[in-house]
Image (tube, rainbow, N blue to C red):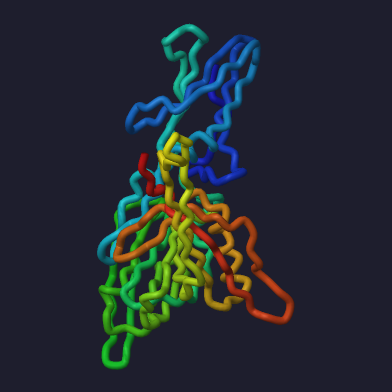
Amino acid sequence: MQFYKYPDAYAPVGAGIPAIFGLQLDAPDNIDLRIRKTESNRLLGGKRFVNVSRADIDVAARIRSVMAFTPSTGKTGFKSTDGRLIRACVEALHPGSETIELTSETRTFIPGDQSAQSSGLRTAMPLNRLIPAGEADEISLFNNNGCTLLVSGSGRDSTVAEQFESSQYGWQVFRLNTADFPDCDTITVDTGIGESIVYTVIPASQNAVRLAWESHTGAIEHYSFPTVRQTSLLVEKLRTESPEGYLVTAAETLRKTTIVSAFERPEVLEPLAELTSARNVWALKKDIYTPIDILTDEVVIQQHGTLCALELAFRPKTTSSWS
């Protein structure tokens, strides 16, 4: 037997993207294929095939489910990609046996739905962005070589430039913290591979709510919603009846916040709309990321003759309760 089919060396596992290992058997037989994470030797799952000459297993959904997306924090610079990249292989063995007949080559699986055949930024947001002073943004890119980023900033009385280098190949995560460039009105991040992100720094607002989310590109995107339209509390109570009347035996409090974006063009609203379906969403405050649950199911991203604003309602992923 031999493996005749492999995913790419750096294989994306975004929704709808297959990542298939194919095994050719010498004769029709029963065979188990198991997915194993190579760094930790953790068994991720498997599939049994009965009386087959070929066995193909698509590992994308299982690999995607164990990817851990944790936003980076701290100062400007390259950050760890731990949890976002999964190295895994497939083992072949006969049912009922623990003897591994054949092990595939290891592949590195990357988040998102974009091919790793070309280097570049992994983002759905426009490359010209507004960012409140003191806030941060996370930049994801894929580079087949070592990566060097040039961050330059300018203000009324100053111009600064700083170079950041990463010896890591492949998927890169870079954090831009505007607090490291306090006197700059404009900050440019040049990837060195023909792409740049230009930030215009605007005054911070105490009322703004900054969200981060995992986009279809595999990146963690950020956006600051300038308006909180409404905050409400909903208390659900569990009651029992007694001779003295009704007694509250348990209660759960739900805090719902409704926020509104600025009036934006469709090329901004469309990636923002992904918040309604994103697997992971966080509210960011003072460098602390709090997981939240988006309650909104439908948003308007384009309306003839006018700019639109996106309105979203969310709640914490964990609720306050007592019993």
Residue 99 at x, y percent in the picture: 42, 10
Q: Residue at the location (52% across, 20% down)?
A: 33
Image side of residue 1 versus residue 54, left or right? left
The C terminus lies in which quarter of the figure?
Answer: top left
Q: Position of residue 231 (x, y in %)?
A: 47, 65
Tell me residue 287's x, y (percent): 30, 63
- Of residues 82 and 299, the one nearer the viewer is 299
The answer to which of 136 and 123 lies nearer the viewer is: 136
Residue 235 vs 75, above or below: the answer is above
Residue at image point 39% right, 82% down: 202
Query: How many labels sit on residues?
Result: 0
Residue found at the very far right of the displayed protein:
304
Q: Quadrant of residue 242?
A: top left
Outermost residue, front side: 243
Report whether 242 appears left or right of 263. left
| Residue 224 falls in image quadrant | bottom left
State the image coordinates of residue 147 (x, y, percent, origin top left).
35, 60
Whether residue 121 is visible, yes or no, is no
Residue 114 to residue 302: above or below = above
Q: Is residue 245 above or below residue 297?
A: above
Furthest toward the bottom, the residue is: 156
Q: Which residue is at a point 42% across and 81% down the rendered structure image?
A: 200
Asked if one can make out residue 242 in the rendered structure from this viewpoint, the answer is yes
**Residue drawn at point x = 33 percent, y = 85 percent:** 154
Question: Vertically, is 60 above or below 3?
Answer: below
Viewer-proximal residue among 190 and 243? 243
Q: Which quadrant of the figure has residue 321?
A: top left
**The N terminus lies in which quarter of the figure?**
top right
